[in-house]
Image (spheres, rainbow, N blue to C red):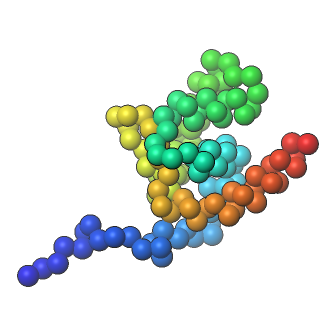
């Protein structure tokens, strides 16, 4: 009798990210904000909502800016999140949701948010 391990539960060790991946994910302020925003939400978030929050964070959102952020997020940020397995993207529902591996970014996000706030002053 063979044991099927394809659906075996992931362990905490499986969810650890390399330091290179952590730095790559957190080097961009839009990615940091997106991860931070999703860390405060329970469950899936519509991608439109997340992009709207990014647009408001940058200032007064315009339709052009929202379109620019949408393209930027799809082409630059989303794939990095998916490759690192920190987000799950439901293309049919148009939602993103944190995966277990994203929790390893939380201490860094907390430090980054303090730094981002001090730079804004």
Q: Residue at x 38, y 41 (%)?
A: 90
Residue 19 shows in this picture: yes
Q: Is residue 47 above or below residue 34?
A: above
Residue at the location (59% across, 33% down)? 51
- Vertical position of residue 6 compared to residue 57: above or below: below
Q: Position of residue 44 (x, y in %)?
A: 46, 42
Q: For the C terminus, which image quadrant? A: top right
Q: Farthest residue toward the bottom?
A: 1
Residue 16 vs 108, above or below: the answer is below
- Tell me if 105 is positioned left or right of 79 in this view: right
Image location (x, y in percent) of residue 85: 46, 58
Q: Quadrant of the N terminus?
A: bottom left
Q: Is residue 118 left or right of residue 76?
A: right
Camera-nearest residue between 49 and 41:
41
Whether residue 21 is visible, yes or no, is no
Q: Nearer the viewer, residue 67 or 52?
A: 52
Up the image or down, 88 lies above or below 75; here it is: below
Nearest the camera: 64 or 16? 16
Q: Position of residue 98 (x, y in %)?
A: 50, 52
Determine the residue positioned at 69% across, 62% down.
108
- Percent coordinates x, y for residue 39 in the rendering: 59, 51
């Amino acid at each position: 009798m063979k044991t099927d391990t394809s659906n075996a539960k992931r362990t905490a060790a499986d969810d650890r990210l390399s330091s290179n991946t952590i730095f790559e994910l957190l080097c961009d302020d839009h990615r940091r904000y997106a991860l931070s925003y999703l860390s405060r939400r329970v469950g899936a978030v519509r991608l439109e909502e997340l992009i709207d929050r990014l647009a408001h964070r940058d200032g007064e959102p315009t339709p052009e800016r929202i379109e620019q952020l949408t393209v930027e997020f799809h082409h630059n940020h989303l794939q990095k999140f998916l490759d690192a397995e920190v987000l799950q993207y439901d293309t049919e529902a148009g939602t993103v949701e944190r995966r277990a591996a994203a929790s390893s970014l939380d201490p860094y996000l907390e430090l980054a948010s303090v730094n981002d706030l001090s730079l804004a002053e």
